Amino acid sequence: MRVAIVHYWLLGKRGGEAVVEGLLKLLPDSELFTLFYNPERVNEAIRARPVHTSFLNSGRRWYRSLLPLMPMALESFDLREYDLVISSESGPAKGVLTPSTTRHICYCHTPMRYLWELYPAYAREWAGARWKRALMAPLANYLRLWDYASAARVDDFVANSENVKRRIWKTYRRDSEVVYPPVDIKSFYWSPAHDYFLIVSELVPYKCIDSAVRVFTTNGRRLLIVGDGPEYRKLRRMAGSTVEFCGRVSAEQLRVLYAECRALLLPGEEDFGIAPVEALASGKPVIALSRGGVLETVPPEGGVLYPNAGDAELALALDEFESREASFAPERLRNWSRKFGPEAFASGMQRVLDRAPEASRAIVPAWPPTH
């Protein structure tokens, strides 16, 4: 069986890439297709596989601006020789064209946020630039139509959480099975806390990192931020002396930062959120906005979940955490995180692969005909 894995872009080492690595372990002979690829930014497990890139790859430096061309680029992939296609979707990926004899499974991290769930927020960001609004409104409408239509090309949807399962139904009116993404639980460990809080995140507006920067600049507590993205320069200008930007760090450095922090912060809503699972695997509690994936990944005894986004609410959550800090039991947090390990992911995906797709059942007529 020839297998193709289609991932929106391979430009970093985030949750989506962890899913790709998990799929490669499950299907070791598969080939990768992606819109953009930078081998220096991904792990060896991905570099070791054949990677087919789109005609847009030479412009990967500006990949966010090439969204209008991505449907055309995806549809240019020739997947006629593959028996199974698994698309990994957060940016566009499921829009590839496959033959009627090919099974297409979409592992959905979320329907594209900037077209659906978060479109009003992105539209507000463009409020000061009339030319952007004039350009983006009809373009976003076209892309939503294409995205909705491309969902019909998928035989089976897999959601990375119950939260995303609801979004898939709301957006595409398609049912899905939940398989949590794989987290390398065993590589994380606990150490006594040093005096800092931690954020591990891509620096984009919907993550609300600016709220944490303002709060920690005001209260004088120490905050370390791991990650990069378009908000980096803006956040650096806002930050006081107690807020430190670490940029991208190695896997080993990240494990140390998790192990020695007081708690992990998530001031914005996550689809699933691998970072809180990694923190719990390190025996560290989580302070997070009580929305989205953390409602599944963080247990009641795993940290402080606060109901509303905002600086004042985050400040109150920090005060509550400090009043309860001694009550968090590292071993209990580590035990909870085991349900999100790679074995659970492999088992869940194997269950999906073993199930006969509805579209392929009883489509071959009996021969010779009975009537």
Image (cartoon, helix red, strand yellow):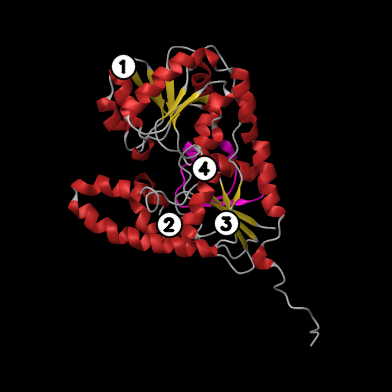
Which part of the image, by quadrant, shows the N terminus? bottom right
Question: From mark 4 to mark 3, how far is it between C-alphas?
Answer: 21 Å
Q: CA distance from mark 3 to mark 1?
A: 45 Å
Quadrant in the picture for residue 268: top left
User: Which residue type does callout 1 highlight?
Assistant: Asn
Tell which circle, 3 or 2, labels the residue nearer the N-terminal end: 2
* Residue toward you, 144 or 287: 287
> How far is the residue under mark 2 from the one under mark 1?
49 Å
User: Looking at numbered disc 3 in the image, what kind of residue is underneath it?
Assistant: Asp
In the image, residue 325 sits, relative to residue 85, either above or below, namely above
Q: Is residue 34 magenta?
A: yes
Image mark for residue 250: none
Going by the numbered disc 4, the residue's amino acid type is Gly
Disc 4 from disc 1: Cα separation: 34 Å
Label 4 close to label 1 by CB (< 8 Å): no
Contact (Cβ within 8 Å) of mark 2 with mark 4: no
Q: Which mark is residue 16?
A: 4
> Is residue 58 left or right of 107 when viewed as pictured?
left
Identify the secondary structure beneath mark 3: loop
Nearer the viewer's eye, disc 4 or disc 1? 1
Q: Which residue is mark 1?
A: 219
Using the image, tell me which numbered label, if any, was put on residue 55. Answer: 2
Q: Which residues are magenta?
A: 26-53
Mark 4 Cα-neighbour bin, 10 Å: few <14, some 14–19, many ≥20: many
Mark 1 lies on a secondary structure that is helix
* Location of mark 3 (residue): 175
For discs 4 and 3, the disc positioned in front in the rendered view: 3
- Left or right of 29 on screen, residue 279: left
Question: Which one is in front, 319 or 251?
Answer: 319
Q: Nearer the N terminus, badge 2 or badge 4?
A: 4
- Magenta stretch holds residue 22: no
